[in-house]
Image: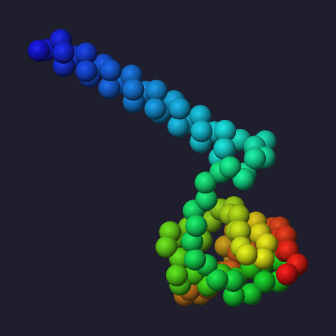
Amino acid sequence: MKKLLYFLLSIFIVLMFGAGWYFSGIIYSVGLNPEFTDSGNVGTAEDRVKIDSVNSSSITFNIEEEQWGYLYENGLYGIIGQNGDAVVGEILSVNENLVTRKLLQIKMERV
């Protein structure tokens, strides 16, 4: 009985090591590799965010319906919308449900 328990425990450890190796490779190849260009195949966290205002250097989001809370954290984010997409950077200000972030890049589609 003890041998069976040791065998099952060793199989479990090998499987956990293999899963960790596999998922760390995915994290590196997609999220941490600066040369990765095939972003169309990367999963996205979809959320409800309304754009309150846009100017040449900043964008303000109304995040009262946001579910994940990521826009309250500093970082580099891609925003995909119906009329185009944008890349936003650091938080410039937070005022209740309005978050203003630095606008790094914007591509609007003509409607």
Q: Residue at 84% x, 74% y: name it.
A: 108
Of the pair 6 and 84, the residue shown nearer to us: 84
Q: From the top left corner, tell me how far across and down residue 85 is, in percent.
A: 77, 69
Q: Quadrant of residue 50?
A: bottom right
Q: Residue 89, can we see it?
A: no
Q: Is residue 30 left or right of residue 102?
A: left
> Picture quarter containing residue 82?
bottom right
Q: Residue 53: percent from the left, percent from the top?
A: 74, 87
Q: Residue 51: where, in percent of width, then height? A: 69, 83
Count every numbered label the image shows and give the total.
0
Q: Quadrant of the N terminus?
A: top left
Residue 41 can be seen, yes or no: yes
Residue at 74% in and 79% down: 59
Q: Is residue 16 left or right of residue 95?
A: left
Provide residue 86's location: percent of width, then percent of height: 77, 69
**Residue 80 vertical placement versus 1 (above, below):** below
Instruction: State the scheme by which the image is colored.
Output: rainbow
Work out which residue is located at the far front of the displayed protein and give it: 111
Left or right of 5 on screen, residue 96: right
Q: Residue furthest left?
A: 1
Q: Quadrant of the C terminus?
A: bottom right
Against 71, is 36 above or below? above
Front in this rendered view, residue 48 or 91: 48
